[in-house]
Amino acid sequence: MGYASIIKALMGHLSAKLELEHHILGKAYIEGVRDLNPGLAFGPLMFFNDKEDYTRDNILALETTNAELEPVAGIITKDEGNVVSHVQLLARALGVPNAVFLNALYGELISVKGKSLFYVITPMGRIILKEAAKMDAAMPTSGDTP
């Protein structure tokens, strides 16, 4: 058994013990998703491919980490990648949220392509991804009119 397998098993065990629940598009997950960098992003989801343009305001979903990646608001990758790659280190330094969504969960992202999303990864590793249109309205404060 390699070190990566041992670390992955320990991370899963630790997440279960901490009851670290991720909230992705209205569902709760304990497995199938892993944080890489904490951060906060808000923007439309795009998928990386050579035919579509994306901007720094997009949350970008990509199959594998790409060294030619331009700045974006948030990153979701399908594969584990390398936590010390140039993209990962740059994302961490800039506070760009970055997580791995494994096969089935990554496949669900197509349903929100182009929609504005709220994406946060806490310093403890909890991942939250919500459609902006489905977020709760703010509670009025005492100075607001009802």
Image (cartoon, helix red, strand yellow):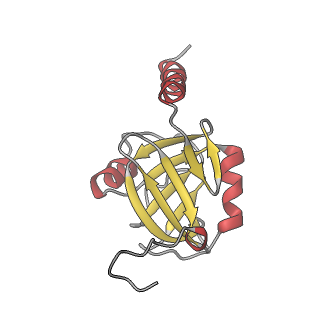
Quadrant, the N terminus:
top right
Residue closest to the far bottom? 145
Residue closest to the far top? 1
140 and 107: which one is in front? 140
Up the image or down, 122 lies above or below 117; here it is above
Q: Residue at x 43, y 41 (%)?
A: 125
Left or right of 32, for residue 10: left
36 and 118: which one is in front? 118
- Residue 45 is drawn in which quadrant? bottom right
Residue closest to the far left? 93
91 and 126: which one is in front? 126
Left or right of 137, for residue 51: right
Q: Residue at x 39, y 47 (%)?
A: 122
Up the image or down, 68 lies above or below 77; here it is below
Q: Position of residue 7 (x, y in %)?
A: 48, 23
Q: Position of residue 21 (x, y in %)?
A: 55, 40
